[in-house]
Image (cartoon, rainbow, N blue to C red):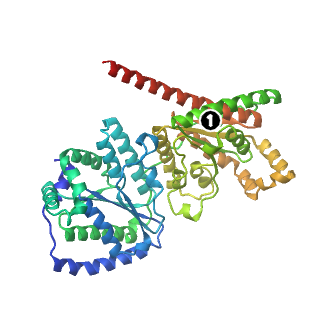
Amino acid sequence: MNQISDLFAEAERGNTVDKADYEAELSELRMELLNLQYDLNRRDFSVVLLIVGDDLPGVVASLRVLHEWMDGRYIQNHVMFDTPGEKFEEQPLVKRYWRRLPPDGSIGLFLGAWPYLLLGTAFDEDWSDEELDRGLDDVSRFEKLLVDDGTLLLKYWLHLPKKKLKNRVAAAERNPQKYWDYAQYDWKFLKRYDDRFDLVERLMGRTNTPSTPWRIIESADPRYRNLALGNHIASALQKRLYSDSAQTVASNAVSKIAQSDESAMDDIDLGASVDEDTYRKKLPKLQARLNRLSHRAHKAGVHCVFLFEGVDAAGKGGAIRRLASALPVQHTRVIPIAAPSETELARHYLWRFWTRLPDSGKTVIFDRSWYGRVLVERVEELAQVHEWSRAYEEINEFEASLHDSNFVVCKFWLQIDTDTQLSRFEARAQTPYKKYKLTDEDYRNRKKWAQHQAAAEEMIALTSTSHAPWTLVAANDKRHARLQVLSTVVERLDAQLRILDAADSKQHRKGKKKRSG
């Protein structure tokens, strides 16, 4: 048997706990869990409890038990047994869970959640191996990101042996009034028990890692199940809270620092310019074409994410305004990213971006983005080395998830030279309605020009991928920069729509051939 099969075999031994032993152990366990929870409340990490299994009533009962034993004020419940209302391809599978992650110092209790969603969708929609592998990749990346960031992730599968499940279904059929909450799910699961367990073992085999292990708990006896669950949670919390080796959680990920004499910045022709007449002719044409494409993209369900990074005073705001004005206002949001709030600081740095991703057919434009982790947070030492160095891989995987879910991601770096920056600072200071743009921080950042440029060069080298390449924009001339941004978006959006049109045409021909046959 494989490792997962061995774990399930261990959970079919028939363990039971008598009432006297249960009550004797319970009082001490409840006190320990409460004390651990209050200690957690003062710490800078969160706990995610994932409870799933083939014993659905036992899973639901675990929520009631943990709330009875612990302080419910610091537990966020997420009961998620349903499959999504939208197709899997339209959104990254884990997006709905990012929105619900608990802040530091608290516990997020997820019942069902991503394993049920993945298993249920794969089984009900008869996924191919490729589709299932993509879903498993999303889950694996998600769990690794949580653990690397310091989250204590505890995963439990409550297991009811097939024979026990049959007995419970039979009892429900004999006495439906007593077992009404068991019958529907148990019967559905029992009908295809073996087929479903093939998927369960595949899921657990891919996501059972040293940093994200599964704990399988025998669930036939409620008293045994409750104690096993409570004791394991207490042990894991105690180890994390009080173990010297666990005080600081560092990622195993190591940045592959770019070591090259060549610089992407050297390829930017900062002398590039466009005269006023050419600009006035090209701008409305590009905007009109983008508007037509954006309406088609909305109908096709294409998500668009456009993000802007660059040197201070490089003209991001002006480029964004020309871009946004060509897009349907009802389907477009511009989100300026400032320093994270206390709520955002209490979660993974990607949380505030996952929660702001556009719905199907809509567009979000980020003025600054998740790349702050490897730019300002790195230069200003707001993130530790192990945090920003692993962010390159995390960001690439985040953007890969978007690409797999029909997102068009355009990333722009706007570059100017130091003389242009200084002249723009001085012009802002003399313009009443632009004075607010100029702050002491702008001049402070200017003194660290070399550090910011080095961070940007490394970022571009390590995060420019085939599905989410960086576009380096020469921005000494604002007209040139704005046209380049618009041209790039038009090209990328047009290419994506052509791909979708070709896929629809292929599917149509396939269906027509099938009908004629």
Compared across the picture, whether 493 is left or right of 419 comes to left
- Residue 365 in the image: x percent, y percent? 62, 45
Q: Nearer the viewer, residue 506 or 468?
A: 506
Q: Is residue 263 visible in the rendered structure shown here? A: no
| Residue 354 seen by the camera | yes
Q: Residue at horizontal 85%, vertical 53%?
A: 432
Q: Is residue 517 above or below residue 69?
A: above
Instruction: Return the x and y of residue 17 as percentages of the image width and height.
Output: 16, 72
The amino acid at mark 1 is Thr
Instruction: Give the image quarter of residue 133.
Output: top left
Quadrant for the C terminus in the image? top left
| Residue 53 placement (x, y as % from top left) | 26, 57
Residue at the spot of label 1: 471
Question: Which residue is at the front of the view, 424 or 462?
Answer: 424
Circle 1 — which element? strand
Q: Which residue appears farthest toward the right when viewing the image?
A: 430
**In the rendering, at what x and y percent does residue 68 appear?**
33, 75
Q: Is residue 465 above or below residue 75?
A: above
Q: Quadrant of residue 47?
A: bottom left
In depth, the one of 298 and 339 nearer the eye is: 298
Crowding at mark 1 (Cα within 10 Å: few <14, some 14-19, many 20+): some
Q: Residue at x 65, y 39 (%)?
A: 327
x 23%, y 78%: residue: 25
Q: Is residue 376 left or right of residue 124?
A: right
